[in-house]
Amino acid sequence: MPNLLLAGPARPRVAASRPAGAPETVAEAVVVRGLRKSFGATAVLQGVDLTVPAGSIVALLGPSGCGKTTLLRSIAGLERPEAGDVRLGERTLSDANGFVVPERRRIGMVFQDWALFPHLSVGRNVGFGLSRSERRDGGVEAALALVELTGLAARMPATLSGGQQQRVALARALANRPAAILLDEPFSNLDATLRVSIRAEVQRLLRDLSVTAVFVTHDQEEAFVVGDEVAVLLDGSLVQQARPADLYDGPATRAVAAFVGDANFVPGSAGGTVADTPVGPVPLRAAASGPVDVLVRPEQLLVEPGDDGVVERVEYYGHDAVYLVRPDGGPVVRARILAAPVHRGGDRVAVRYAGAPTVGYPATGEAPVCVGAAAGA
């Protein structure tokens, strides 16, 4: 499938440390407001708001089937929403009054399966959306050099490795100098080792070019590594968008907390900015009163010799280890240590909280005690 481009006047360029010979890009912000999309009776997007500042990378994170790809396709113009606005810089691409077709949006897209034309050479794939003069003036060669595939223009896609095919797809998206680029789980077809190395290359390239990018993934580690910000989409709703550290430390809902990283929810009784729990007093990010479920990350727990609970199981991973400990009067919690385990199943130990102030959720619901505190304010 060809890249998706919106024709229009040039915009002010975002300054960047641009690799030599790289196609010039004109980064613009992507803004989505109130986007709704259904397929039949199934509501897939339910009033989604998303902001991607010009020149930044936002990782769109969520489980399979939550609407990530539909949102991406709606931004690209491959799906027509029932309601809401999509803007690229100062231009409205989709709203109640009009709809700009995909080829005029000036948005590049890298698909999950890369969507290379198998009957076209690498060079013709990359140059598919370029004018004859752009191809003659070296646009294809510059794009291939950008992804370190110089000299492969005459090859056919089937003769390339998976990692090389992925780079061809990226070069094709960048060759047209898009105002924004959308990447739909572009590494999912790669093996684990290659995925990490290609991911690092793509992240570096996007940052060097200051390309506005939306990167879809269901992998939390990938989202945290690649994204300047992470936007969490659950059941068709964008529930939180924040910097990775803020999202991890202050998830807006219990559902986000459970989805983003390992999470213990420890019952407690809050009185002000401290909650009494089976793992000792836990400081809270906002004052609360009454029963709460306190978010405790495994690395925030210390396990020491003592008599507060019992080790039920030990999981050793080489680079770290996890104790599953049942405190007296509380549920089993996971505690992570960056060392070889010294306790064994059945040992009596002390377990206590040793982290920064965290979030307390009402014991009977998912809403945070204080939205501002939970969101990292």
Image: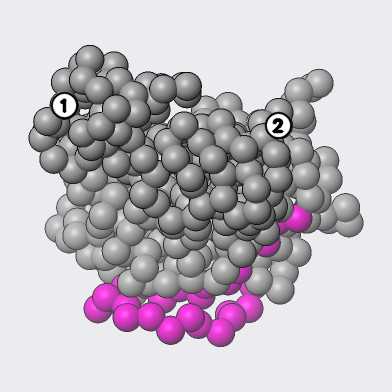
Type of amino acid under label 2: Gly
Please tell me which residue lies in front, 273 or 29. Answer: 273
Q: Give the range drawn in magenta.
A: 7-33
Type of amino acid under label 1: His
Which residue occupies 32% across, 80% down? Answer: 17
Which residue occupies 55% across, 71% down? Answer: 54
Dominant secondary structure, magenta: loop
Which residue occupies 88% across, 52% down? Answer: 96
Quadrant assignment, res 209: bottom left
Mark toward the start of the polypeptide (1 vs 2): 1
Q: In this view, does 305 lie to the left or right of 328?
A: left
Residue named by callout 2: 365
Please tell me which residue lies in front, 206 or 313. Answer: 313
Q: In this view, does 249 lie above or below 15?
A: above
Q: In this view, does 234 lie above or below 248?
A: above
Residue named by callout 1: 343
Quadrant of the drawing holding the C terminus: bottom right
Residue 265's spot in the image, x, y percent?
51, 32
Q: Residues within 10 Å of mark 2 (few under 14, many from 20)?
A: few
